Amino acid sequence: MTSPARNIANESILLRKDEGGVATLTMNRPQARNALSMALMDAMIQELDAVAEDSTIKVVVIAGTGPGFCAGHDLKELRADPRREFYEATFRRCSEVMLKITHLPKPVIARVHGIATAAGCQLVATCDLAVAAKEARFATPGVNIGLFCSTPMVALSRAVPRKQAMEMLLTGEMISAARALEIGLINRAVDADGLDSAVGALASIIVGKSPKILAIGKEAFYRQAEMGLADAYAYASEVMTKNMMARDAEEGIDAFIEKRPPKWQGC
């Protein structure tokens, strides 16, 4: 099933396709390199909320049409309304998109081709996993135009080591998919003609897991990452106890012991 995002009249700027438990959200502003306009960010928030409530969806893929994944914020839109209030609203909305992805109780995979720059690189860094074509390139180039990539910095600095993040932020230079893989910005770099199959294979593995357990684990991963070591272990111990009480944990352990495939109940 493919459909335009909800409530975006006469403009399919975000497409959704559901197949095999995977919802693919495709940014559809190819002429603008899928720049994150306010309308596109609104559409993404709507669809992420819808996916969160859809029990048939186990994994989300974020992709883009045209020659590139995402070129960041729509600079023409920003310059067309140079009010402080509009700037604040734009960056607040972008932060909301990123937080929606992090808080979504389902894994999110970025499917990256072409370029992923500025807020587009932020989007890649925010997704739980990322698979890119070998030809893809990444950058936080705001420094080149007098606009330091401060909000992309939040996700980037949490995805890659500090020195590598600072080099990207201070130089604004493009890095290759191979370099992005080396520093941990992406999980895999594959031939362009194998990008869909690589994303699909990764998604299909995750679809086979218990959605209840994935939700518990994803939330715990991001929460413990912001804690001190002792607090993280205390919190993780509580999560493990909660996890052990879930029916899917009982089923999974029993299936392992009995050497059979588990039958997840989602609870």
Image: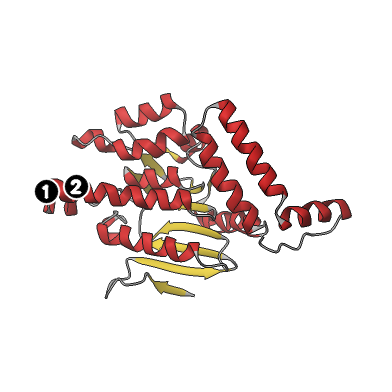
Determine the residue positioned at 54% across, 36% down: 224
Real-space CA distance between mark 1 and mark 2, rounded to the nearest whole angstrom: 7 Å
- Compared to 247, does 144 lie above or below? above
- Which x, y percent locates residue 78? 17, 50
User: In terms of image quadrants, where is residue 57?
Assistant: bottom right
Residue lying furthest right: 258
**Residue 186 visible in this rendered orientation of the protein:** yes
Determine the residue positioned at 60% across, 47% down: 217
Left or right of 178 in this view: 66: left
Per the image, the residue denoted by label 2 is: 87
Q: Given the image, on which type of amino acid does mark 1 rest?
A: Arg
Q: Given the image, on which type of amino acid does mark 2 rest?
A: Tyr
Determine the residue positioned at 53% across, 55% down: 105
Residue lying furthest top: 163
- Looking at the rendered structure, the secondary structure element under dot 1 is loop
**Residue 112 visible in this rendered orientation of the protein:** no
- Which x, y percent locates residue 182? 51, 33
- Which x, y percent locates residue 112? 44, 51
The quarter of the image holding the C terminus is bottom right
Q: Nearer the viewer, residue 250 or 184?
A: 250
- Which x, y percent locates residue 120? 35, 47
Q: Nearer the viewer, residue 157 or 194?
A: 157
Q: Residues within 10 Å of mark 1 (few under 14, many from 20)?
A: few
Left or right of 84 in this view: 236: right
- Looking at the rendered structure, the secondary structure element under dot 2 is helix
Label annotation for residue 52? none
- Compared to 34, does 157 lie above or below? above
- Compared to 5, does 238 lie above or below? above
Label annotation for residue 83? 1
Q: Are marks 1 and 2 in contact (CB under 8 Å)?
A: yes
Determine the residue positioned at 20% across, 49% down: 75
Q: Residues within 10 Å of mark 2 (few under 14, many from 20)?
A: some
